[in-house]
Image (spheres, grey):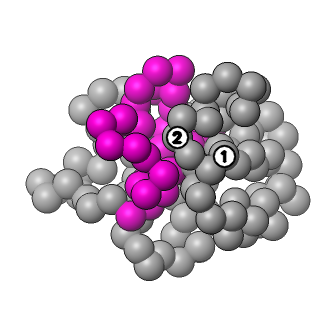
Amino acid sequence: MSNRDRILVVDEISDTADVLQAVLEPRGVTVNRVRRWCETNGAAVDNRPAVVVLDAESLPGGVTPTAGEWQNVPQVIIGMLRPATSPSSLECPTDVQRRYLQKPFQFAELVQAIELLISQRR
């Protein structure tokens, strides 16, 4: 990871963003946080992130994480059930790569998923 990497956390509770800041910012990664998916449009987020971390409870009904300007940004979705097909289906049929973490999760799992998505992007 490098200082040009940015992570966007979409979560109503700040714990996830706080832990990611403590772990990733010393490595040169900027962690930004918004409370709701609708805040990702406009001035709340000024640069395209390397990875978006989404708490499923922060997504309003009917809005998918691939909508709008965040299309094709790798995502870690927390709290959403995995697809029932196979482990290889953790990637979307589109160009977006996704990893799913069920609640409760370990922060080490989240950091590992973020690092994996960033390394695959390069």
- The residue that disc 1 covers is 34
- Check disc 2 and give the amino acid type: Trp
Q: Is residue 18 left or right of residue 64?
A: right
Residue 114 visible in the snapshot:
no
Who's the residue at 52% across and 27% down the image? 70
Horizontal and vertical percent position of residue 52: 56, 43
Residue 79: quarter of image: bottom left
Contact between marks 2 and 1 (CB within 8 A): the answer is yes
Disc 2 to disc 1, C-alpha distance: 7 Å
In this view, the residue in front, 29 or 42, is: 42
At 81% from the left and 67% from the top, the residue drawn is 22
- Judge whether residue 3 is colored magenta: no
Task: Check the image and report above or below for 42 versus 118.
Answer: above
Residue at disc 1, secondary structure: strand
Q: Which residue is mark 2?
A: 37
Position of residue 45 relative to residue 25, above or below, is above
**Magenta span contains residue 53:** yes
Say what secondary structure mark 2 lies in.
Answer: helix
Q: Which residues are magenta?
A: 50-79
Residue drawn at x 56%, y 46% as measured from the top left: 36
Which residue is pictured at 30% across the width and 27% down the height? 94
Report the amino acid beneath label 1: Val
For the C terminus, the quadrant is top right
